[in-house]
Image (spheres, rainbow, N blue to C red):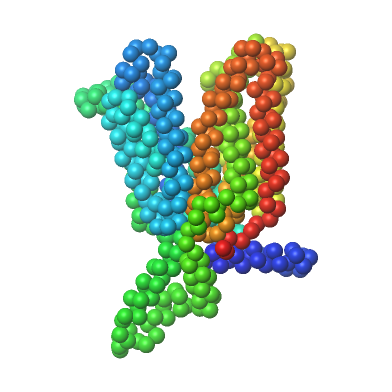
């Protein structure tokens, strides 16, 4: 918790020197080393969440058909599979704020430990299901326990300060991307093992009766392992909980009668008595610990609402863009697409993903420190508008040549370069969300609200974007480009809102 004092002090110094026009006279603050082990545990929990969320994607449609709910009509598969996926986002949206509020009251650690445990049980339940509605209930459970991702972001905000927070959050989107890649691989390779590997699993009747249990069990194991490691090494970061633990230890130490073994100064090894700096930290933590979680109405202040609004536009435009990319790439050239086959689409997206990950790990933290989270967010919102606006350009060159020629590939490269701002967008908006929290006691609730807003936007964006794409082509609205015009407009509104974000960080000292 030494970073709490550092963060507030560094921001106070920056604000005061800026007001006195003396910033150039002060040395640049030294970067605090990242708490690597604590970040590793938080990232491990975050990694388990996308694995459990995406492991079902390769087999969920067949699983739905196997339950008999479609009664042999494969045209209904998409509808029922959509119900399962909507149940996940709906449950997450309903509970994510409550997890944040609970973490403000009971501590970050117990809430974070509940997540992997619940995900493990939900995945096992999903794999053992044999009817459609059990699948829906199990998927709802996954959404409920996936909802504590906002709590992990609160922990990241509490174990970092203004000098290293950008580096920590630069890695966060990559964990979701990595987990979202591993999940479908596990689901595809391990589903129906008795049929895929008859020599190994063919004689085990259990895998004939429950052909999708194995990938679910592996995902559950990943979540369980993350929970076990977290239970061993994750430290509490909520100021009030840390303060109560310090009081308990101090009381226990005071109850020990000094003797020839303990000595009169045996308590000097306690962190609270180690130095003047630690004493100052103790006072700082004590002050913050006195804050109770504020009522809900106290969160509805302009800086919080504006940040949440920007986040909602970001989530909607990002999900819409993710849906449009494979649609445009796979649609025939005559209809305005590029006519790519699945292999080529996968190669493009996979190559881009690897390059994007390397770029983000190398440069994103430095970029946010250099230009600030607000400016990075503005550029990211602009980049989304450019990415979407380039789809009609791709269509124009593809139709002119009748195929994907050099001009098309040049535009694709430009488009993918701007698309690399996606991780920067989420890293910067998360920093802005942390800074917008009215007090440290409201950090979990603020993160919970942001996660709820994002979940709602991500749940409705795919259907809206894909429907607009189909309608635009079917009725040739704006030459089939109406969907792009609408979404560019939405992205530009998000950009305008980003300019209304607070110009500089605000302290959260109540």
Q: Residue at x 33, y 24 (%)?
A: 132
Q: Is residue 339 in sight in this rendering?
A: no
> What is the quadrant of residue 393 in the picture?
top right
Q: Residue furthest right?
A: 21
Residue appearing at x 43%, y 48% in the figure = 99
Q: Residue 59's image quarter?
A: top left
Q: Which residue is painted at 40% across and 57% down in the image?
A: 106
In the image, 301: left or right of 93?
right
* Residue 133 to residue 121: above or below: above
* Res. 96 image quadrant: top left
In percent of width and height, residue 403 lies at 66, 14
Residue nearest the observer in this picture, 278 or 240: 240
The image quadrant where one finds the C terminus is bottom right
Residue closest to the eye, 170 or 497? 497
| For residue 459, side relative to residue 244 (left or right) | right
Residue 341, image x and y in percent? Answer: 55, 17
- Vertical relation: 195 (above or below) 373: above
Residue 453 location in percent, x, y?
Answer: 53, 40
For this rendering, which residue is in front, 320 or 414? 320
Whether residue 103 is visible here, answered yes or no, is: yes
Between 115 and 354, the one lying in front of the other is 115
| Residue 436, position as x, y percentages in the image | 60, 53
202 vs 173, left or right, is left
């Amino acid at each position: 918790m030494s970073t709490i004092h550092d963060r507030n002090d560094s921001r106070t110094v920056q604000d005061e020197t800026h007001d006195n026009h003396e910033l150039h006279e002060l040395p640049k603050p030294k970067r605090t080393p990242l708490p690597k082990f604590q970040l590793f545990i938080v990232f491990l929990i975050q990694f388990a969440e996308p694995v459990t969320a995406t492991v079902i994607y390769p087999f969920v449609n067949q699983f739905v058909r196997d339950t008999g709910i479609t009664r042999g009509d494969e045209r209904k598969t998409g509808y029922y599979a959509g119900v399962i996926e909507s149940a996940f986002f709906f449950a997450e949206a309903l509970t994510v704020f409550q997890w944040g509020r609970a973490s403000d009251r009971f501590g970050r650690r117990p809430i974070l430990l509940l997540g992997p445990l619940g995900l493990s049980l939900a995945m096992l339940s999903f794999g053992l299901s044999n009817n459609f509605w059990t699948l829906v209930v199990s998927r709802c459970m996954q959404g409920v326990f996936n909802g504590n991702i906002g709590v992990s972001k609160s922990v990241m905000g509490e174990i970092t300060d203004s000098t290293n927070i950008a580096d920590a959050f630069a890695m966060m989107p990559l964990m979701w991307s990595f987990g979202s890649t591993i999940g479908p691989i596990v689901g595809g390779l391990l589903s129906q093992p008795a049929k895929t590997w008859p020599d190994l699993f063919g004689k085990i009747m259990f895998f004939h009766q429950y052909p999708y249990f194995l990938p679910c069990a592996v995902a559950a194991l990943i979540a369980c392992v993350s929970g076990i490691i977290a239970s061993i090494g994750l430290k509490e970061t909520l100021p009030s909980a840390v303060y109560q633990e310090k009081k308990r230890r101090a009381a226990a130490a005071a109850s020990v009668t000094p003797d020839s073994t303990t000595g009169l100064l045996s308590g000097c090894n306690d962190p609270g008595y180690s130095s003047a700096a630690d004493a100052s930290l103790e006072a700082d933590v004590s002050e913050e610990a006195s804050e109770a979680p504020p009522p809900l109405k106290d969160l509805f202040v302009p800086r919080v609402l504006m940040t949440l609004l920007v986040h909602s536009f970001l989530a909607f435009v990002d999900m819409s863009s993710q849906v449009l990319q494979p649609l445009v790439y796979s649609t025939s050239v005559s209809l305005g697409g590029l006519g790519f086959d699945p292999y080529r689409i996968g190669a493009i997206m996979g190559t881009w993903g690897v390059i994007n990950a390397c770029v983000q790990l190398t440069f994103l933290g430095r970029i946010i420190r250099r230009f600030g989270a607000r400016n990075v967010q503005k550029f990211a919102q602009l980049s989304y508008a450019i990415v979407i606006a380039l789809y009609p350009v791709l269509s124009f060159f593809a139709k002119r040549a009748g195929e994907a020629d050099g001009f098309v590939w040049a535009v694709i490269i430009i488009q993918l370069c701007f698309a690399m701002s996606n991780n920067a967008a989420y890293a910067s908006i998360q920093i802005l969300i942390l800074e917008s929290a009215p007090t440290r006691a409201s950090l979990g609730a603020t993160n919970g609200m942001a996660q709820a807003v994002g979940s709602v936007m991500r749940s409705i964006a795919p259907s809206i974007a894909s429907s607009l794409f189909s309608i635009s082509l079917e009725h040739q609205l704006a030459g089939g480009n109406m969907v792009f015009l609408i979404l560019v407009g939405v992205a530009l509104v998000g950009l305008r809102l980003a300019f209304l974000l607070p110009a500089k960080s605000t302290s959260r000292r109540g």
